[in-house]
Image: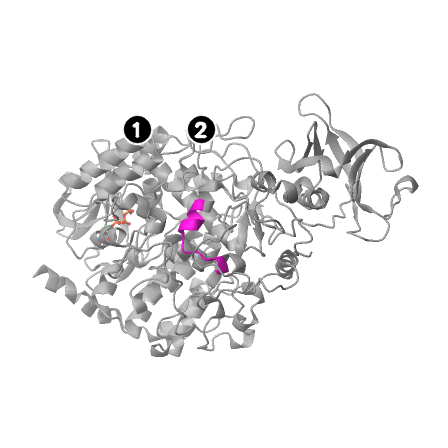
């Protein structure tokens, strides 16, 4: 479909169904729809589509007309409350919409002039229901499918002069999430998203390149915020997404505020830290303070003159943004805890760096695009962004014929980056075209990072609008995070309820049945009844996690050292994650997993988890204090991969693989830890759709909120390998929303110095960091990879721990 200004109609969607829950899930409103052109041939509707100026329609004699655009059976209701649904034959011509008793009735029962139509939008009344409004009439049309709905909607919309021309503002905001390639602006974005986008480093070129991805990451980002707020008890089922009967939000969502803060991820509260300067926790806090981007949360982490606020002040300020005394109370509590411990509470922002950022000014929305990368990884076996032909078609349709304003090809169409199958492991050094610095097209002369008039959410500027696809139509009450029944059945992730947000897929939506008391009951059933204080004696604190302190202790009976993770349950908003962790650790004993030894409930609210002691600590610290050789990287990857292979063979996905969650002991053993985010796959549910993990390590399919499987861990392993090579994961310095966009769109990340790496290592990375999930290696396949054959023996890792002795002395 043409997207030239002469046709102010919505065009075909980029990817139908992909963002259907964009708004509904984010609490932005309940009623919106998307447009597309569709040649519906549903047998239900028997619709015909001849297009503009198409050949005469095959209708009954009475209605045969050269200007019939579309006709078909629809179920109609003329009044919301009183009237009944009745099957009718509807005929759209260039200037009228007429309702006939049936297909052969030539006389229309009712005719609406398209010039009178003031609104057309999708509604909740039925699954595929369209509302058409004139000044004095509201009609509801129930259709059979999205295709039909979009087809009718587009065709009516494009011929209704009040739509998008004389009254575009109303329409756009109520109805379409669209992208106008001419002005390079999104239309119909919720206010909060517009603000986020305006503040982010995502450029207009980015919008042009992949508008769908921009919406994906906005959704991801706001969902992420929502979940984290829920974790802190700022939201949750009571006040987050509850909708009133008419579909509108019944309570104010904190996410309506674009400045809503983001909080520390993990199992719960960003606890106060009391670690030595080199500890990863301390570094995380430092990093969060240093790199808090002004663009997204600088407004809560900066004082009036732009100076960073103290973390407690920032947190308190964050609470103000959330609003309400509960939030303020939380902030105060956390701040108090932080100062009590003489430590800084983390600045809200789990999307931020978990490594110390290099000293530099706070990121701002005007941060320039990153320079072109120096090199690229070998091409993965299949194209990173090879869209299906349907995708390509939809995109091509949506984008229309090339115009001067379209500077970027969709990634999938960019033949420069399409790897050849036969060259799958061949290193390439060409720059990734889609990583090149942004260029302004002639029609796009606004600074790349500065929203132009008509940019995100703007109502300025005429259509054409390229409609994008909210993931699902508005839906009622998205409430508490559900547990997956099969998880419960399996005994693993029994209480992972709150972990799981309602999936984009309606079928996955479940309501958690586990309340706090049940979770505690479950916990009591898995812990030992013994008194741990009679069994162990603590030696010293060795770590600080989000949910508690970690101590090295001595087993009184044997003298053997063990680690105890001690958690105050009264401070754990996500107790189910802890139960999850215990259950997974208990069931998944393996040499490459930090083995669970026992757990205890002390005084009913203190949980002790006793596990193997890994004196080498987290790989993060090792990376920070060493330059790793390839054989050492290989060895760590090999060991981690064995652990992953074991988990995956048990149908468990770890979902948070990163250097922080890989521990080493003095002998060089490498083990995976932190099972709070694990998910158990079952026959009934072999894929997941929940957004879990740490953004920089997340696979594109997770960021794009698609269904995913165990291979997300393989992607994260690849990112962890990059950490070992480059000290940090890709995009760590990017502004968070931009980082998400880059993960979603860039495909396999590029390396800073590919020329310094062996062919085997680059090949390994390419099969881990393969966007095409089918082509991404499994853990078993990786174990056979040439690079892992280079692994040094475990004692070869021991020198990496020398820094610890130096630190201790
Ligand atoms: N078994 C262990 N042996 C030695 N040190 C450990 C062990 N487990 C954890 N640690 C240390 O304690 C730190 C915190 O561990 P923890 O698992 O609590 O971290 P976390 O994943 O950030 O927290 P949480 O799981 O509560 O979100 C680790 O970074 C590590 O240095």
Residue 122 picture location, percent across and down: 63, 37
Which residue is nearer to you in this view: 301 or 233? 301
Tell me: 369 left or right of 455.
Answer: left
State whether the magenta stretch is mostly helix, strand or loop. helix
| Image quadrant occupied by the C terminus | bottom left
Q: Quadrant of residue 782?
A: bottom left
What residue sits right under mark 2 in the picture? 251
Q: Which mark is residue 325?
A: 1
Label 1: how many residues lie within 10 Å, few (<14), some (14-19) or many (20+)? few
Q: For numbered disc 1, what is the local secondary structure?
A: helix
**Residue at (69% x, 52% y) in the render:** 7
Residue 638 picture location, percent across and down: 34, 67
Q: Would you say the beta carbon of the disc 1 residue lies within 8 angstroms of ligand 1? A: no
**Residue at (24% x, 71% y) in the render:** 627
Q: Where 286 sits versus 728, above or below? A: above
Tell me: 169 left or right of 214.
Answer: right
Residue range highlighted in magenta: 195-205
Which residue is nearer to you in this view: 624 or 541? 624
Q: Would you say the beta carbon of the disc 2 residue lies within 8 angstroms of ligand 1? A: no
**Residue at (61% x, 33% y) in the render:** 124
Can residue 82 be seen? yes
Q: Earlier in the sequence, mark 1 or mark 2?
A: 2
Which residue is nearer to you in this view: 12 or 444? 444
Instruction: Residue at the far right: name it.
Output: 61
Q: Where 497 sits versus 208, above or below? A: above
Residue 743 counted in the magenta span: no
Q: Which mark is residue 434?
A: none
Residue 757 picture location, percent across and down: 35, 76
Q: Where 676 sits versus 724, above or below? A: above
CA distance for labels 1 and 2: 15 Å
């Amino acid at each position: 479909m043409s997207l030239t200004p002469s046709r102010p109609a919505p065009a075909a969607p980029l990817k139908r169904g992909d963002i259907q829950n964009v708004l509904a899930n984010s609490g932005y409103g309940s009623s919106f729809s998307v447009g597309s052109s569709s040649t519906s041939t549903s047998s239900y509707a028997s619709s015909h589509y001849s297009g503009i100026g198409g050949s005469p329609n095959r209708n009954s004699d009475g209605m045969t007309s050269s200007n019939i655009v579309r006709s078909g059976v629809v179920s109609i209701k003329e009044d919301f409350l009183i009237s009944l649904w009745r099957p009718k034959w509807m005929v759209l011509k260039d200037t009228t919409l007429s309702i006939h008793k049936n297909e052969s009735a030539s006389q229309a029962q009712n005719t609406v002039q398209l010039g009178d139509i003031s609104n057309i939008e999708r509604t909740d009344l039925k699954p595929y229901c369209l509302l058409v409004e004139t000044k004095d009439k509201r009609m509801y049309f129930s259709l059979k499918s999205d295709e039909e709905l979009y087809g009718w909607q587009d065709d009516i919309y494009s011929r209704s002069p009040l739509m998008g021309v004389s009254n575009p503002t109303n329409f756009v905001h109520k109805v379409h999430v669209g992208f106008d390639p001419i002005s390079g602006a999104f239309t119909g974005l919720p206010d909060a998203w517009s603000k986020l986008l305006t503040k982010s480093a995502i450029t207009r070129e980015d919008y042009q390149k992949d508008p769908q991805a921009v919406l994906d990451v906005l959704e991801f980002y706001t969902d992420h915020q929502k979940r984290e707020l829920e974790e802190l008890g700022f939201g949750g089922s009571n006040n987050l997404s509850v909708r009133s009967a008419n579909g509108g939000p019944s309570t104010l969502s904190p996410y309506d505020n674009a400045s809503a803060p983001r909080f520390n991820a993990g199992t719960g509260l960003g606890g106060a830290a009391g670690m030595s300067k080199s500890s990863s926790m301390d570094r995380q806090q430092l990093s969060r303070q240093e790199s808090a981007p002004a663009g997204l949360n600088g407004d809560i982490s900066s004082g009036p003159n732009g100076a960073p606020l103290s973390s407690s002040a920032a947190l308190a300020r964050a609470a103000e943004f959330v609003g309400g005394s509960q939030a303020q109370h939380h902030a105060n509590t956390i701040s108090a805890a932080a100062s009590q411990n003489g430590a800084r509470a983390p600045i809200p922002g789990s999307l931020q760096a978990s490594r110390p950022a290099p000293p530099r000014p706070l990121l701002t929305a005007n941060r320039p695009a990153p320079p072109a990368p120096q090199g690229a990884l070998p091409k993965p076996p299949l194209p990173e962004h090879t869209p299906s032909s349907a995708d390509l078609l939809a995109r091509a349709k949506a984008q229309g014929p090339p115009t001067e304003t379209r500077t970027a090809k969709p990634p999938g169409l960019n033949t420069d980056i399409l790897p050849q199958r036969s060259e799958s492991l061949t290193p390439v050094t060409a720059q990734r075209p889609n990583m090149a610095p942004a260029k302004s097209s002639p029609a796009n002369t606004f600074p790349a990072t500065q929203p132009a008039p008509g940019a995100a959410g703007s109502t300025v500027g005429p259509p054409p609008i390229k409609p994008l696809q909210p993931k699902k139509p508005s839906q009622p009450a998205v409430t508490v995070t559900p547990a997956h029944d099969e998880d419960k059945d399996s005994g693993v992730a029994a209480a992972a309820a709150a972990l799981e947000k309602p999936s984009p897929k309606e079928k996955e939506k479940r309501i958690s049945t586990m309340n706090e008391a049940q979770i505690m009951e479950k916990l009591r059933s898995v812990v030992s009844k013994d008194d741990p204080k009679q069994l162990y004696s603590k030696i010293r604190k060795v770590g600080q996690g989000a949910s508690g302190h970690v101590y090295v202790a001595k087993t009184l009976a044997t003298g053997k050292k063990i680690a105890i993770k001690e958690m105050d349950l009264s401070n754990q908003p996500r107790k189910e994650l802890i139960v999850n962790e215990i259950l997974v650790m208990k069931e998944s004993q393996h040499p490459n997993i930090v083995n669970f030894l026992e757990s205890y409930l002390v005084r009913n609210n203190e949980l002790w988890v006793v596990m193997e002691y890994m004196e080498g600590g987290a790989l993060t610290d090792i990376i920070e204090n060493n330059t790793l050789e390839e054989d050492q990287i290989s060895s760590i990857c090999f060991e981690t991969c064995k652990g992953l292979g074991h988990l995956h063979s048990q149908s468990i996905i770890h979902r948070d693989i990163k250097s922080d969650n890989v521990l080493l002991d003095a002998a060089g053993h490498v083990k995976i830890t932190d099972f709070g985010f694990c998910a158990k796959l079952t026959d009934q549910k072999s894929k997941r759709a929940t957004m879990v993990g740490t953004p920089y390590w997340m696979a594109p399919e997770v960021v794009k909120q698609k269904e995913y499987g165990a291979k997300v861990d393989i992607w994260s392993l690849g990112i962890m390998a990059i950490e070992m090579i480059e000290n940090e994961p890709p995009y760590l310095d990017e502004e968070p929303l931009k980082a998400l966009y880059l993960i979603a769109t860039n495909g396999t990340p590029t390396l800073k110095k590919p020329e310094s790496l062996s062919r085997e290592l680059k090949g390994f990375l390419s099969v881990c960091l393969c966007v095409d999930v089918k082509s991404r290696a499994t853990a078993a396949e990786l174990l056979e990879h040439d690079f892992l054959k280079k692994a040094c023996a475990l004692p070869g890792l021991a020198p990496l721990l020398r820094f610890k002795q130096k630190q201790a002395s």
